[in-house]
Image (spheres, rainbow, N blue to C red):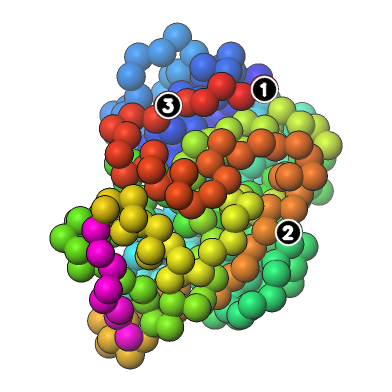
Amino acid sequence: MRIFAVGATGFVGRTLVPVLADAGHEVTVLVRTKSPFAPHPRIQTISGDPMLPGPWQAAAASHDAVVNLAGAPIATRWDSATKERIRLSRVRTTEMVVEALRAAPPKVFVCANAVGYFGDQGDTPLGDDAPAGTGFLAEVAQAWQEAALTAQACGHRVIIPRFGVVLGPGGGALKAMLPVFRLGLGGRLGSGRQWFPWIHIEDVAHGIRFVLEHDDLSGPINFVAPETITNAEFTRALAAALNRPAVFAVPAWVLHLVLGEAASMLLTSQRCEPRRLQAAGFSFAYPDIATALRHAVRMPKYSHPTRA
Protein backbone atom coordinates (compact mmCIF):
# COMPACT_ATOMS: atom_id res chain seq x y z
CA MET A 1 0.00 0.00 0.00
CA ARG A 2 1.21 3.53 -0.81
CA ILE A 3 0.49 5.75 2.19
CA PHE A 4 0.67 9.55 2.43
CA ALA A 5 1.27 10.82 5.97
CA VAL A 6 0.40 14.32 7.21
CA GLY A 7 1.55 15.60 10.60
CA ALA A 8 3.78 12.54 10.95
CA THR A 9 6.99 14.25 12.07
CA GLY A 10 5.82 14.41 15.70
CA PHE A 11 5.85 11.91 18.55
CA VAL A 12 3.36 9.42 17.11
CA GLY A 13 4.46 9.78 13.51
CA ARG A 14 8.12 9.10 14.27
CA THR A 15 7.10 5.65 15.48
CA LEU A 16 4.29 5.01 12.99
CA VAL A 17 6.15 5.72 9.74
CA PRO A 18 8.97 3.17 10.29
CA VAL A 19 6.41 0.59 11.44
CA LEU A 20 4.49 1.00 8.18
CA ALA A 21 7.65 0.94 6.09
CA ASP A 22 9.00 -2.15 7.85
CA ALA A 23 5.65 -3.86 7.14
CA GLY A 24 6.26 -3.37 3.41
CA HIS A 25 4.22 -0.22 2.78
CA GLU A 26 5.63 2.76 0.88
CA VAL A 27 5.26 5.96 2.89
CA THR A 28 5.44 9.56 1.70
CA VAL A 29 5.69 12.06 4.57
CA LEU A 30 4.66 15.70 4.24
CA VAL A 31 7.31 17.85 5.95
CA ARG A 32 7.72 21.59 6.44
CA THR A 33 11.52 21.46 6.64
CA LYS A 34 13.84 18.46 7.00
CA SER A 35 12.90 14.83 7.56
CA PRO A 36 13.30 13.34 11.06
CA PHE A 37 13.50 9.80 9.66
CA ALA A 38 16.57 7.65 9.08
CA PRO A 39 17.15 6.72 5.42
CA HIS A 40 14.79 3.92 4.41
CA PRO A 41 14.06 2.54 0.93
CA ARG A 42 10.30 2.80 1.50
CA ILE A 43 10.18 6.27 3.14
CA GLN A 44 10.30 9.51 1.17
CA THR A 45 9.32 13.10 1.91
CA ILE A 46 7.61 15.98 0.15
CA SER A 47 7.62 19.59 1.33
CA GLY A 48 4.48 21.57 2.00
CA ASP A 49 2.17 23.21 4.51
CA PRO A 50 -0.85 21.01 5.37
CA MET A 51 -2.94 24.05 6.24
CA LEU A 52 -2.53 25.55 2.77
CA PRO A 53 -3.38 24.28 -0.71
CA GLY A 54 -0.35 23.09 -2.66
CA PRO A 55 1.24 20.41 -4.85
CA TRP A 56 1.22 18.06 -1.85
CA GLN A 57 -2.54 17.59 -2.36
CA ALA A 58 -2.06 16.02 -5.80
CA ALA A 59 0.61 13.75 -4.30
CA ALA A 60 -1.78 12.70 -1.51
CA ALA A 61 -4.49 11.92 -4.05
CA SER A 62 -2.12 9.60 -5.93
CA HIS A 63 -1.63 7.30 -2.91
CA ASP A 64 -3.77 4.40 -1.70
CA ALA A 65 -4.24 5.81 1.81
CA VAL A 66 -3.77 9.03 3.75
CA VAL A 67 -2.99 9.24 7.47
CA ASN A 68 -3.53 12.62 9.14
CA LEU A 69 -1.92 13.16 12.56
CA ALA A 70 -1.67 16.95 12.44
CA GLY A 71 -2.54 19.01 15.49
CA ALA A 72 -0.93 21.72 17.62
CA PRO A 73 -0.03 20.77 21.24
CA ILE A 74 -2.78 21.26 23.83
CA ALA A 75 -0.66 21.01 27.00
CA THR A 76 -0.44 24.74 27.62
CA ARG A 77 -2.55 27.51 29.12
CA TRP A 78 -5.35 28.39 26.71
CA ASP A 79 -6.07 31.92 25.61
CA SER A 80 -8.23 32.82 22.62
CA ALA A 81 -5.29 32.71 20.20
CA THR A 82 -4.10 29.33 21.51
CA LYS A 83 -7.60 27.89 21.23
CA GLU A 84 -7.89 29.01 17.65
CA ARG A 85 -4.49 27.52 16.83
CA ILE A 86 -5.48 24.20 18.41
CA ARG A 87 -8.75 24.13 16.46
CA LEU A 88 -7.40 25.28 13.09
CA SER A 89 -4.40 22.94 13.18
CA ARG A 90 -6.82 20.03 13.32
CA VAL A 91 -9.91 21.10 11.42
CA ARG A 92 -8.28 23.18 8.68
CA THR A 93 -5.64 20.53 7.96
CA THR A 94 -8.34 17.87 7.73
CA GLU A 95 -10.36 20.04 5.36
CA MET A 96 -7.27 20.42 3.13
CA VAL A 97 -6.80 16.63 3.03
CA VAL A 98 -10.47 16.05 2.21
CA GLU A 99 -10.21 18.64 -0.55
CA ALA A 100 -7.27 16.71 -1.98
CA LEU A 101 -9.31 13.50 -1.95
CA ARG A 102 -12.54 14.97 -3.28
CA ALA A 103 -12.09 13.84 -6.89
CA ALA A 104 -9.72 10.93 -6.20
CA PRO A 105 -10.61 7.24 -6.56
CA PRO A 106 -11.73 5.52 -3.32
CA LYS A 107 -9.01 5.45 -0.69
CA VAL A 108 -8.49 4.87 3.03
CA PHE A 109 -8.39 8.02 5.15
CA VAL A 110 -7.22 7.67 8.75
CA CYS A 111 -7.74 10.93 10.62
CA ALA A 112 -6.54 11.13 14.22
CA ASN A 113 -8.83 12.32 16.98
CA ALA A 114 -8.84 12.15 20.77
CA VAL A 115 -10.85 10.84 23.70
CA GLY A 116 -11.41 14.49 24.53
CA TYR A 117 -14.40 13.99 22.21
CA PHE A 118 -16.28 12.50 25.18
CA GLY A 119 -15.78 15.40 27.56
CA ASP A 120 -16.21 14.57 31.26
CA GLN A 121 -18.28 11.38 31.55
CA GLY A 122 -17.54 10.38 35.14
CA ASP A 123 -17.61 6.62 35.75
CA THR A 124 -19.65 5.73 32.65
CA PRO A 125 -17.94 3.08 30.48
CA LEU A 126 -17.40 4.60 27.02
CA GLY A 127 -17.48 2.45 23.91
CA ASP A 128 -16.59 3.68 20.44
CA ASP A 129 -20.15 4.86 19.81
CA ALA A 130 -20.62 6.76 23.09
CA PRO A 131 -22.07 10.25 22.69
CA ALA A 132 -19.98 13.39 22.47
CA GLY A 133 -19.45 15.49 25.56
CA THR A 134 -19.12 19.20 26.18
CA GLY A 135 -16.23 21.60 26.70
CA PHE A 136 -13.58 23.09 24.45
CA LEU A 137 -11.67 19.88 23.63
CA ALA A 138 -14.91 17.99 23.01
CA GLU A 139 -16.07 20.68 20.61
CA VAL A 140 -12.74 20.64 18.75
CA ALA A 141 -12.80 16.84 18.49
CA GLN A 142 -16.36 16.91 17.15
CA ALA A 143 -15.51 19.50 14.48
CA TRP A 144 -12.36 17.54 13.61
CA GLN A 145 -14.34 14.32 13.21
CA GLU A 146 -17.07 15.98 11.17
CA ALA A 147 -14.48 17.42 8.76
CA ALA A 148 -12.92 13.98 8.27
CA LEU A 149 -16.20 12.14 7.78
CA THR A 150 -17.14 14.37 4.83
CA ALA A 151 -14.70 12.23 2.83
CA GLN A 152 -17.20 9.36 3.08
CA ALA A 153 -19.47 11.18 0.65
CA CYS A 154 -16.66 10.92 -1.92
CA GLY A 155 -16.52 7.13 -1.51
CA HIS A 156 -13.52 6.91 0.83
CA ARG A 157 -13.24 4.58 3.84
CA VAL A 158 -12.74 6.92 6.81
CA ILE A 159 -11.33 5.76 10.15
CA ILE A 160 -11.25 8.02 13.23
CA PRO A 161 -8.83 6.68 15.87
CA ARG A 162 -9.56 8.43 19.16
CA PHE A 163 -6.29 8.44 21.08
CA GLY A 164 -6.01 8.21 24.82
CA VAL A 165 -2.89 9.61 26.50
CA VAL A 166 -0.03 8.20 24.42
CA LEU A 167 2.80 6.80 26.55
CA GLY A 168 6.27 6.02 25.24
CA PRO A 169 9.92 6.92 25.61
CA GLY A 170 11.29 10.16 24.27
CA GLY A 171 8.19 12.32 24.13
CA GLY A 172 4.48 12.71 24.70
CA ALA A 173 2.94 13.05 28.14
CA LEU A 174 5.82 11.26 29.90
CA LYS A 175 8.35 13.79 28.69
CA ALA A 176 6.91 16.37 31.07
CA MET A 177 6.10 13.93 33.87
CA LEU A 178 9.36 11.99 34.22
CA PRO A 179 11.62 14.74 35.61
CA VAL A 180 9.11 15.43 38.41
CA PHE A 181 8.51 11.77 39.24
CA ARG A 182 12.23 10.94 39.16
CA LEU A 183 12.70 13.52 41.88
CA GLY A 184 10.04 11.80 43.97
CA LEU A 185 7.73 14.79 43.62
CA GLY A 186 5.02 13.17 41.52
CA GLY A 187 1.47 12.65 42.69
CA ARG A 188 -2.16 12.41 41.76
CA LEU A 189 -4.04 15.30 40.18
CA GLY A 190 -7.14 16.56 41.91
CA SER A 191 -9.02 13.72 43.60
CA GLY A 192 -7.18 11.13 41.50
CA ARG A 193 -10.48 9.31 40.99
CA GLN A 194 -10.91 10.49 37.40
CA TRP A 195 -10.41 7.76 34.79
CA PHE A 196 -7.20 7.97 32.81
CA PRO A 197 -7.48 6.55 29.25
CA TRP A 198 -4.01 5.66 27.93
CA ILE A 199 -2.22 3.65 25.24
CA HIS A 200 1.39 2.72 24.54
CA ILE A 201 2.83 4.34 21.44
CA GLU A 202 3.71 0.95 19.92
CA ASP A 203 0.06 -0.05 20.10
CA VAL A 204 -0.92 3.24 18.45
CA ALA A 205 1.43 2.59 15.54
CA HIS A 206 0.46 -1.05 15.07
CA GLY A 207 -3.20 -0.18 15.62
CA ILE A 208 -3.10 2.29 12.74
CA ARG A 209 -1.43 -0.32 10.57
CA PHE A 210 -4.15 -2.78 11.63
CA VAL A 211 -7.07 -0.53 10.65
CA LEU A 212 -5.41 0.39 7.36
CA GLU A 213 -5.11 -3.28 6.45
CA HIS A 214 -8.62 -4.34 7.56
CA ASP A 215 -11.13 -3.22 4.96
CA ASP A 216 -14.13 -3.92 7.20
CA LEU A 217 -13.21 -1.21 9.71
CA SER A 218 -14.39 2.38 9.43
CA GLY A 219 -15.68 5.22 11.60
CA PRO A 220 -14.63 6.12 15.16
CA ILE A 221 -12.44 3.62 17.03
CA ASN A 222 -11.17 4.05 20.59
CA PHE A 223 -7.37 3.77 20.65
CA VAL A 224 -6.97 3.05 24.36
CA ALA A 225 -5.48 0.15 26.30
CA PRO A 226 -7.84 -2.54 27.63
CA GLU A 227 -6.85 -1.86 31.25
CA THR A 228 -8.89 1.05 32.60
CA ILE A 229 -7.21 2.92 35.45
CA THR A 230 -7.71 6.09 37.44
CA ASN A 231 -5.27 8.97 37.67
CA ALA A 232 -4.25 7.81 41.15
CA GLU A 233 -3.56 4.29 39.86
CA PHE A 234 -1.48 5.70 37.01
CA THR A 235 0.47 7.81 39.51
CA ARG A 236 1.28 4.76 41.64
CA ALA A 237 2.28 2.70 38.60
CA LEU A 238 4.63 5.39 37.28
CA ALA A 239 6.24 5.85 40.69
CA ALA A 240 6.71 2.08 40.96
CA ALA A 241 8.27 1.88 37.49
CA LEU A 242 10.80 4.50 38.60
CA ASN A 243 11.19 3.08 42.12
CA ARG A 244 10.26 6.44 43.59
CA PRO A 245 7.62 7.57 46.07
CA ALA A 246 4.52 9.45 44.92
CA VAL A 247 3.06 11.00 48.04
CA PHE A 248 2.25 14.46 46.76
CA ALA A 249 -1.06 15.61 45.32
CA VAL A 250 -1.93 18.66 43.24
CA PRO A 251 -5.33 20.03 44.27
CA ALA A 252 -7.77 20.89 41.51
CA TRP A 253 -7.79 24.56 42.51
CA VAL A 254 -4.02 24.78 42.00
CA LEU A 255 -4.34 23.30 38.50
CA HIS A 256 -7.05 25.82 37.67
CA LEU A 257 -4.88 28.62 39.04
CA VAL A 258 -1.85 27.58 36.94
CA LEU A 259 -3.54 26.36 33.76
CA GLY A 260 -6.91 28.09 33.77
CA GLU A 261 -9.45 26.38 31.55
CA ALA A 262 -6.77 23.94 30.31
CA ALA A 263 -6.85 22.25 33.73
CA SER A 264 -9.97 20.47 32.49
CA MET A 265 -7.85 18.16 30.32
CA LEU A 266 -6.20 16.79 33.50
CA LEU A 267 -9.32 16.54 35.63
CA THR A 268 -11.96 15.16 33.26
CA SER A 269 -12.92 11.50 33.62
CA GLN A 270 -13.21 9.22 30.58
CA ARG A 271 -13.55 5.48 31.16
CA CYS A 272 -12.89 4.53 27.54
CA GLU A 273 -12.81 0.94 26.31
CA PRO A 274 -11.28 -0.40 23.05
CA ARG A 275 -14.30 -2.49 22.10
CA ARG A 276 -14.03 -2.32 18.32
CA LEU A 277 -10.27 -2.94 18.21
CA GLN A 278 -10.59 -5.99 20.41
CA ALA A 279 -13.63 -7.32 18.54
CA ALA A 280 -11.68 -7.00 15.27
CA GLY A 281 -8.86 -9.13 16.69
CA PHE A 282 -6.19 -6.54 17.44
CA SER A 283 -3.67 -7.79 19.99
CA PHE A 284 -2.20 -5.20 22.36
CA ALA A 285 1.52 -5.59 23.04
CA TYR A 286 1.13 -3.45 26.18
CA PRO A 287 -2.33 -4.17 27.63
CA ASP A 288 -1.56 -3.18 31.23
CA ILE A 289 -0.03 -0.02 32.66
CA ALA A 290 2.81 -1.74 34.55
CA THR A 291 4.15 -3.40 31.38
CA ALA A 292 3.71 -0.25 29.32
CA LEU A 293 5.54 1.96 31.80
CA ARG A 294 8.41 -0.49 32.26
CA HIS A 295 9.13 -0.14 28.55
CA ALA A 296 8.35 3.57 28.33
CA VAL A 297 10.66 4.72 31.13
CA ARG A 298 13.54 2.26 30.82
CA MET A 299 14.00 1.52 27.14
CA PRO A 300 15.90 4.06 24.99
CA LYS A 301 14.41 2.57 21.81
CA TYR A 302 11.30 0.64 21.00
CA SER A 303 11.40 -3.12 20.80
CA HIS A 304 8.94 -3.27 17.88
CA PRO A 305 7.23 -6.53 18.98
CA THR A 306 6.47 -8.93 16.18
CA ARG A 307 2.86 -8.67 15.04
CA ALA A 308 0.69 -10.95 12.99
Give how far apart the Cα atoms at labels 2 and 1 are: 24 Å
Classify 251 as above or below 110: below
Mark 3 and mark 1 lie on one chain; the one further toward the N terminus is 3
What amino acid type is highlighted by mark number 2?
Asp
Q: Is residue 223 left or right of residue 292?
A: right
Classify 186 as above or below 63: below
Answer whether labels 2 and 1 touch (C-beta < 8 Å). no
Chain part drawn in magenta: 244-251
In the rendered structure, find residue 303 and report the number of the disc placed on it: 3
Q: Is residue 100 left or right of residue 248?
A: right
What amino acid type is highlighted by mark number 1?
Ala
Q: Nearer the viewer, mark 3 or mark 2?
A: 3
Q: Position of residue 262 (x, y in %)?
A: 38, 76
The residue shown at (26%, 76%) is 248
- Whether residue 29 is visible here, answered yes or no, is no
Q: Residues within 10 Å of mark 1 (few under 14, many from 20)?
A: few
In the rendered structure, find residue 128 and report the number of the disc placed on it: 2
The residue shown at (43%, 33%) is 15
Q: Residues within 10 Å of mark 3 (few under 14, many from 20)?
A: few
Helix, strand or loop at label 1? It is: loop
Q: Nearer the viewer, residue 247 or 54?
A: 247
Q: Nearer the viewer, residue 127 or 155?
A: 127
Q: Which residue is mark 1?
A: 308
